[in-house]
Image (cartoon, helix red, strand yellow):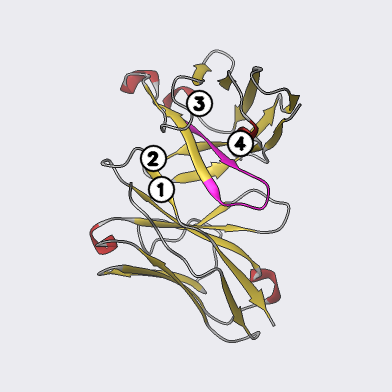
Amino acid sequence: SYVLTQPPSVSVAPGKTARITCGGNNIGSKSVHWYQQKPGQAPMLVIYYNSDRPSGIPERFSGSNSGNTATLTISRVEAGDEADYYCQVWDSSSDHLYVFGTGTKVTVL
Amino acid sequence: EVQLVESGGGLVKPGGSLRLSCAASGFTFSNAWMSWVRQAPGKGLEWVGRIKSKIDGGTTDYPAPVKDRFTISRDDSKNTLYLQMNSLKTEDTAVYYCTTLSPYYFDYWGQGTLVTVSS
């Protein structure tokens, strides 16, 4: 089964840039999607197909994907960005067709 | 506006059954692929299964942990998605989210319903 590894936590000061990585074997050959989950809320899609933003998601959220690592970048971090972030891929060879990363808690200092 | 509202969660004993419902609105439900995703307390997200639209075959897929125990169905006349859960185990305890599928990512999520499996 395909495995996606994320750092458990990332801390960032307001106004700075947060980078959340998602590691997987040759993940650059797959499309990566990202979700934000604030405490007590359902997850919300923030990036799809590596770097596309759904309507209503600020331009401060961007994504990239190459080699064995995909990255979600949050620029000019705000207090409201504090949340858990999950990456996700579709992998037809996995039992879990839809694979989620382990999740990263972003803390705004 | 897309809305997904889950219901049917609750406390059930190990070995028991439960059926979750998801009422959909704000989009053409009959054309949508739908899915369930769960989250155990304090844990990450896990895909539980999907159902394609009838025009795409209406077929279902499940991961091994729930295959042969969980069944997803849909009633397009009622804009409602279902998750029938049988032979429940304590490890099935989680918040269950109804989502739309596009078809490789989950674009809209409901607020979730909590299922607790405990004696």
Amino acid under disc 2: His
Q: How many labels sit on residues?
A: 4
Q: Which residue is mark 2?
A: A96
**Crowd rating for badge 4 (residues with CA inside 10 Å; few <14, some 14–19, many 20+):** few
Amino acid under disc 1: Val
Q: Which residue is mark 3?
A: B29
Amino acid under disc 3: Phe
Residue B33 lies left or right of residue A16; in this view the side is left
**Residue A104 picture quarter:** bottom right
Q: Position of residue B48 (x, y in %)?
A: 49, 34
**Crowd rating for badge 2 (residues with CA inside 10 Å; few <14, some 14–19, many 20+):** many
**Crowd rating for badge 1 (residues with CA inside 10 Å; few <14, some 14–19, many 20+):** many
Residue at x 66% of width, y 17% of height: B16
- What secondary structure is marked by label 1? strand
Residue B67 lies left or right of residue A82; in this view the side is left
Residue B114 lies left or right of residue B96; in this view the side is right
Q: Which residue is mark 1?
A: A99
Give the vertical position of A56 relative to B34 (above or below): below
Q: Position of residue A105 (x, y in %)?
A: 60, 67
> Magenta part of the protein: which range?
B32-45
Give the vertical position of B33 relative to A85 (above or below): above
Q: Chain of mark 4?
A: B
Residue at x 33% of width, y 62% of height: A24
Mark in front: 3 vs 4: 4
Residue at x 57% of width, y 82% of height: A76
Query: Is residue B41 part of the magenta span, yes or no?
Result: yes
Mark in front: 4 vs 1: 4
Q: Are marks 3 and 2 on the same chain?
A: no
Query: Is residue A4 part of the magenta span, yes or no?
Result: no
Q: Chain of mark 1?
A: A
